[in-house]
Amino acid sequence: MSDYTVRALRPDETRTASELFRAALHVPPLKDEDWTYVGRMYQPGRTLGAFDSELIGTARSFDAELTVPGGKRLPVAAVTGVGVRADRTRRGVLSQLMRTQLADFAERGVPLAALYASEGPIYGRFGYGVSTLAHDHEIDPRRVTLRPEVPAGGEIETLGLKAALERLPEIYAGLPHPRPGAMTRPPYWWPAFERHMREEDKPPVTIVHSGPDGVDGFAVYSVQRKSWREPAVLDVIGLHAANDEAFAGLWRYLLSVDLVDVIRAEGRPVDEPTALLCTDYRVVKTTAVTDDLWLRLVDVPAALAAREYEGEPVVLEVADTLLEDNSGRYRVGQDGVSRTEAPAELRLGVDALAMLYLGAWPASALVTAGRVQAADPDAVARADRLFATRPSAWCGTHF
Ligand SMILES: CC(=O)SCCNC(=O)CCNC(=O)[C@H](O)C(C)(C)COP(=O)(O)OP(=O)(O)OC[C@H]1O[C@@H](n2cnc3c(N)ncnc32)[C@H](O)[C@@H]1OP(=O)(O)O
């Protein structure tokens, strides 16, 4: 028996939860003036607290939608704000918070949950798997020459902080986000973005791209230089483009900003062709390949049925120790998904299923790593084809 309880927090308790979470991340508590807007990111009823004599752990979530292969958007519970007090870790507090949270998502019929992980070993045990990957790039802009066929791009408008905060929610919502893993940005997301924008020493700059049909892309960046003796770094905080002209136009601008020694663009899609814009492919260095979004299939049959597939069917046997209703065999094919009594061809945990689901990992790689067991070796190539996706999965909305 645990000597603590877990319950949903009242609105007047969320600031204490924020302080606990920030302390767990080694950052100071928010000032009163910041809390006035940051407090708005707490969706009512969605912050859990673990208590013994006082609050010792917390986790929260907010509602959004996630694009799945084929283009449908499914409800997703975006999980964040997870922290346990340093003097109460490794005694099961997070596990209890995660179990309570997942049971709540399942009861409310939310098919997916997702998060960004602070560390790799934490969330697999709760059924989350790395379902999108990202590249970190570093570019020396002085060495870049764009290839002659790169589109000219359209008009660029620069927005100050106030205008950016007012206009970006609508601009983001108006762009197509076709990649599997793309997420909507509901009102509960934007206060954290505002906090990030206000936190920077040098206020970030927003540029908006317009083509013949109006606004079709934007980027947010900031330039940091510790002293005049040190290199100036332009950090691309976000870049979303609806078409090739907008992608080229935004990069043309970023590459032309003066007094910049290094451009860093972290967390970009793995198939984004930034290097292909340049005459010298090597000037765009990939400095890291990282996990982007971790996904959890809360309702396996609903989530499997919502995406599209191509090719011959496979029979998967899924094991889910936390949400037992998900366990069982599924025939997955381009003609649909159904539960089946047919023999299992591939066996996997619900965390490995999340890694397959958006197409980030081929089934064959998961078999090689022992994450999927192939009862029928022929099924591996079929699963590779069935779950493959283009363009590559990417979320690009950190929370
Ligand atoms: C989505 C987000 O918000 S990401 C931010 C997550 N928060 C942080 O990283 C803040 C700092 N860390 C913490 O607050 C805590 O250490 C937490 C939340 C990561 C873990 O909380 P705990 O209450 O210690 O986790 P709990 O005791 O339930 O651990 C469950 C299991 O996970 C393991 N585990 C938990 N955290 C870690 C970790 N960081 N590294 C490796 N293993 C871990 C435990 O050893 C335990 O394993 P076992 O079941 O085999 O014994």
Image (cartoon, helix red, strand yellow):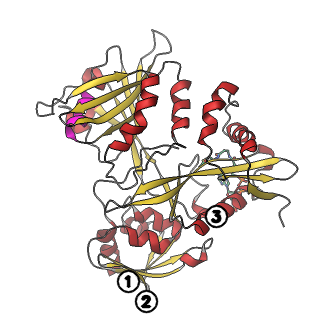
> Magenta residues, as a range?
243-252
- From the image, tell me which residue sits under label 1: 376
| Mark before the other along the chain sequence, 2 or 1 | 2
Mark pair 3, 1: CA separation: 36 Å
Residue 216 picture quarter? top left
| Image location of residue 229, percent across then percent down | 45, 10
Q: Amino acid at mark 2?
A: Pro
Residue found at x 38% / y 83%: 376
* Front of the two marks 3 and 1: 3
In the rendered structure, find residue 27 and report the number of the disc placed on it.
none
Look at mark 2 in the image and give the residue it sits on. 343
Mark 2 vs mark 3: give the one in front. Answer: 3
Which of the pair 120/334 is nearer the observer? Answer: 334
Q: Who is closer to the viewer here, 396 or 132?
A: 396
Label 2 sits on a secondary structure element that is loop
Q: For numbered disc 1, what is the local secondary structure?
A: loop
Residue located beneath label 3 in the image: 104
